[in-house]
Amino acid sequence: MGPRERFAVFRARDFSVFFIGYVTSHLGTSMASVALAFAVLHTGGSPTDLSLVLAARIVPMVLFLLGGGVLGDRLPRRLVMLVADSVRAISQGALAVLFLAGPVPLWTVLALAACGGIGEALFRPSFDGLVPQLAPKGRLQEANSWLGMAQSAANVAGPALAGMLVAFTSAAVVLLVNALGYLASIGALLMLRVDGQASGLGSSSMVTELRAGWRAFSAHTWLWTVTLQFTFFNLIVWAPYLVLGPVSADRFYGGPEAWGLIVGTFGGGSLLGGLLLLGRRPSRPLVVTTLITFLWAAPSAALAVRAPLWTVCAAALAAGVSSAVFNSLWMTTIQQNVPADSLSRVMSYVTFGAYSVGPIGLALAGPLAEYTSIGLVLAVGVGWQVLANSAVLMVPAVRNLRALNFGPDESSTANPIDSAESTTSEAPKS
């Protein structure tokens, strides 16, 4: 693939407009994640308080995800995303105003964080279903790679900028920037000319629609296997890292600037991973994703032994590369093998499964670290990641799944029947 072909996806006007809005909103979101953590810690909050705040966002997101998937398949996805961004803009704007006014009661922070989680639950399934509608034919993996790199670029600039702004101004300023970013996303969504997807749901009940979505999800062994893997990943590895990473930075590495550098380096690795993957289409995508995500535990391992800051950053860089490769190949595999009219519901099951027990990990990470040690909690996660990835590699449906490669003039959506047959058997057709 030549240099010009790598940018061919931007010839689609709707994708380009959406891309700009997504970059802007995600920049604010990546800044806010750092700001909120230190807003809690610097106003007298404990690691347990931070666990509760992070869990308060995840719990409603998990509870509303499946409903968000149904809405994403029943209603125009752009409309659902507009509502979601409006909810998120209001919740983050309210947090910014309250922190500007003075100390904020913990219950208020929890309530507004929960509103943001509801907005995320509505946004994510429709986002995953909208991307194939925006991508030019045969350019779906490139679209996912560019969106992943946009997120990565925001993850590089956002935390570093947030660390400086928190140090020299306040967390409230960063939260206000996040709210304005969601307004930019709303503007981009309003400019899209994409047609509403044809809904096959009719007037059936939500329970009926959820059952149909479950059948589409459970039909693919590779799909539910990897989803199950990341259910425990978020519980045992990533949730403790999200809580204990900022705590470690505050206690051992100098404060918010160090955590901003670590998270920003992770984003830099994601950007590098996206660039390395662009134009490459491995024949066995899930083998690649499983092998490379061994590196996702690297930052936890470095923090567990209190390695020097440069070592922690190097580990975060490696984890970022693995994140970009996984996300692009994983999303493209799902979008190519799942029928378009059930894609939002299937993605809601994927996300629900991956995050369903995450709040438990967020809520327990702080107390467990206080009872034992930060290093021990993080080390358990590292050991789990090695064992889980090794087990996934032994599943034939994961090892044998072959990519569906399309040329630029071919459709980017697989035939659902052929796709299901080829990806669930132990000896798929080449």
Image: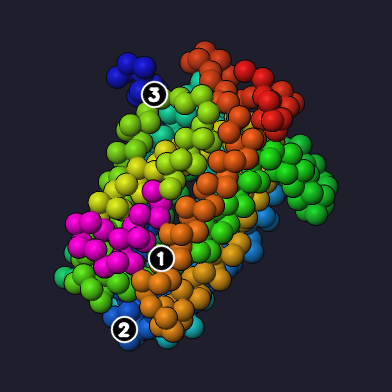
Magenta stretch, residue numbers: 295-312
Q: Nearer the viewer, residue 133 or 292?
A: 292
Q: Amino acid at mark 3?
A: Gly
Is 305 within the magenta? yes
Distance between the alpha carbons at the discs numbered 1 and 2: 29 Å
Q: Nearer the viewer, residue 178 or 358?
A: 358
User: Which residue occupies 51% across, 24% down?
Assistant: 283
User: Which residue occupies 43% across, 71% down?
Assistant: 377
Residue 396 at x, y = what percent?
64, 35
Residue 110 at x, y = what percent?
49, 77
Is 176 within the magenta? no
> Circle 1 is placed at which residue position?
379
Vertical placement of residue 236 versus 202, above or below: below
Q: Give the color scheme: rainbow, by chain, secondary structure or one colour.
A: rainbow
Left or right: where does residue 403 sit relative to residue 171?
right
> Circle 2 is placed at which residue position?
43
The disc label shown at residue 279, or none: 3
Residue 390 at x, y = what percent?
52, 46
Magenta span dominant secondary structure:
helix
Q: Amino acid at mark 2?
A: Thr
Nearer to us: label 3 or label 1:
1
Secondary structure beneath label 1: helix
**Which badge, 1 or 2, is on the more N-terminal residue?**
2
The disc label shown at residue 138, or none: none
Nearer to us: label 3 or label 2:
3
Q: Pointers 3 and 1 in contact (CB under 8 A)?
A: no
